[in-house]
Amino acid sequence: MKEGVQRIPSSNAMKHVTYERAFNVIKSFEQKLVERRYDLVLGIARSGVIPAVMISQTIDVTVAFIQCGRTQEPRFMDNIDVKGKKILLVDDIIGLGLTMRKVYDFVRNHGADVSTCCLYYDEETTQFTPDFGYSTEHFMHAQWDRKDVTPRSRQALSDKNGRCTTSDTFECFGTDLDGVFLDDINRKAYRLEGRIQQILHYRDHLKPMDNIPVINHSDVHIITARPMMDFDRTRRWLDANGFTDVQLSCRDPANYGNGHEESARFKAEQILKTGISKYFESDLLQAVLIAKKAPCTDIYWWGKKDRLRIYANDVTAPFTI
């Protein structure tokens, strides 16, 4: 095992790489990277740009970028001469390692002394082991690549045989229903004895709110904690109010219980399954819980007046109040 490579037990492996986690990984390499006295940090665009910039700022070394794809040959994006220089080549996550191998050979053939670094790599599948990186058995999804896993982006990748640019990545929007598209009815009202049908009839005839998020409805997935038994009447409300293009997912009570925790779990799992990059939630507590479970998705609390982006991570450092 190389000097800078460390192993993460599968029981502790994370499936999401947030900006904070990336920074912590880089800090763990800092001393060894400083000791190598590199002349240049070279990030592989696009995914390696963020970690390369982080490393550049951490060890105070100039950063430049090189472009390479699955079916593209490497090319320097800056007018640089790497001959005789110590280069740290950076990507975010290594799967098969084909891109890293291609770029590594390219830069070495230009006369550079090259070391390699990534945040995570899969030692079971990779054909290239970096000098610095954490090995893991799990698929890792980086926060800055959130648009790469949306349905339209995956389709573009397939259609173009991997020859995609930034113009081929697309957002995929998800939203809550009650409190975003129409007024939310207090949960207690549904528990009033003998009133449930009256409440549902009232809800079925509510008009859409004036402050619905301004997004292309054909790219919207509504994920609501309404039970599956309400799917048909909810679909009718959407169609009757002009939202025929939106996709709808309702909670299956057989798999998800009531309450904030279970509703948030359902929504987060649907967000990750669908590949949603931005999600609007009307309940603040659920927004926090969803952000914790889906940290690589942009989660927004869509309150009646306030609009906040929610970023939720476990506190790892001890503190007192």
Image: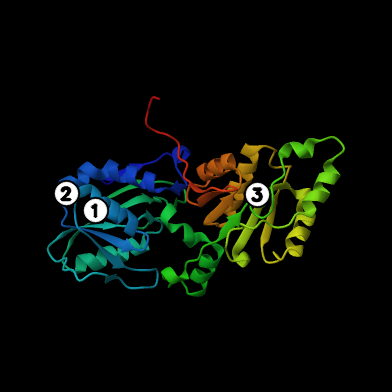
- Say whether disc 3 or disc 2 marks the residue closer to the N-terminus: 2
> Residue drawn at (54%, 67%), measured in percent from left and top?
152
**Above or below — where is 80 with respect to 297?**
below
Q: Which mark is residue 176?
A: none
CA distance for labels 3 and 2: 54 Å
Tell me the residue that label 1 is attached to. Answer: 56
Considering depth in this image, is 7 or 181 the residue closer to the camera? 181
Q: Is residue 231 visible?
A: yes
* Front label number (3 vs 1): 3
Q: Quadrant of residue 96?
A: bottom left
Tell me the residue that label 3 is attached to. Answer: 179
**Above or below — where is 21 with respect to 49?**
above
Q: Secondary structure at mark 3?
A: loop
> Residue drawn at (79%, 56%), measured in percent from left and top?
232
> Residue drawn at (48%, 61%), measured in percent from left and top?
147
Tell me the residue that label 2 is attached to. Answer: 36
Q: Residues within 10 Å of mark 3 (few under 14, many from 20)?
A: many
